Image (cartoon, rainbow, N blue to C red):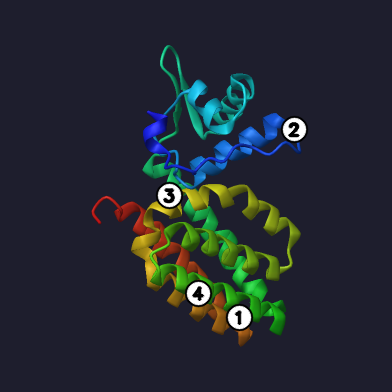
Amino acid sequence: MLSAGLPQGTVPKLERPGPLRERVYEALLELITTRALRPGQHLVESELAGHLGVSRQPVREALQRLNTEGWVDLRPAQGAFVHEPTEEEADQLLSVRTLLEAEAARLAAAHSGRPGIEALEELCSKGERAVAADDVDLAVATNAAFHAKVMELAGNVVLSELAGQVDRRVRWYYTPVARQRGTQSWIEHRELIAAIASRDEQRATEIMRAHTEHTRQTYHRREQG
């Protein structure tokens, strides 16, 4: 049941500004992305509405939209369930991510100045502290912020837009392996920062490609871990 899958305080009641249906959609998507709502979990409209402090109508609309986008499966006579991604789905998305982020790393090495490098170093330190404290949620969020910063430093609007389309799903797949990747992931981030700071485009590309490939491989090995 939903109530057993959401820790106390996980879902604050929604604030009033902004269209209600959009806020309910964003709240549910965030819960799915962070795996507070886990793949395969049954989503009961009345329980979701109660947690969010809204009526069932915007919840129903949000679930229909999430179904269209592939986050939720609507099963006749059974209800709504968080989608369970196949290994092939994960592999395809993480492979595309590698292509996008390797190019972003190359461009970041070509264009980044000292302020950008310092921003990456600050995020890396934050991520390292999160791993040391075993704060998985913070580590996942900081990892996403680090990669978003590299994409920003690349300075390519089209590339950034494409990356934005897969960012939520990358977080979804990264969350269950964040603890396994742990310290090694941030060691690789440090290596990437060094390559970007030295303006070594080829090295930055290679490091990012290997880094994202390590995450893809870890995802596929997660059950063995």
Looking at the rendered image, the disc whose residue lies closer to the viewer, 4 or 1, is: 4
Helix, strand or loop under label 3: helix
* Image position, residue 126 (x, y; %): 53, 72
**Residue shown at the point (60%, 84%) measured from the top left:** 200
Task: Identify the mark at residue 38; answer none if there is no mark.
Answer: none
- The residue indicated by pointer 2 is 19
Q: Is residue 114 left or right of residue 200?
A: right
- Near mark 3 (Cα within 10 A), the count class, few <14, some 14-19 or many ≥20, is some
**x 34%, y 62%: residue:** 180
Task: Say which of marks 3 and 4 sits in front.
Answer: 4
Q: Distance between the residues labelled 4 and 1?
A: 10 Å
- Label 1 secondary element: helix
What secondary structure is marked by label 2?
Answer: loop
Tell me which amino acid carries mark 2: Pro
Q: Which residue is drawn at 50% across and 74% down?
A: 189
- Residue with the mark numbered 3: 91
Q: Which is more foreground, mark 2 or mark 3? A: 2
Q: Which amino acid does label 4 sit on?
A: His
Which of 21 and 92 lies nearest the eye of the viewer?
21
How far apart are labels 1 and 2 at the CA level? 41 Å
Percent from the top left, x then y, of residue 95?
A: 48, 55
Earlier in the chain: of badge 1 and badge 2, it is 2
What residue does disc 1 label? 196
* Mark found first going from the N terminus, 1 or 3: 3
Please state the horizontal and vertical placement of residue 174, each as a whole percent of the image: 44, 55
Give the residue at mark 4: 189
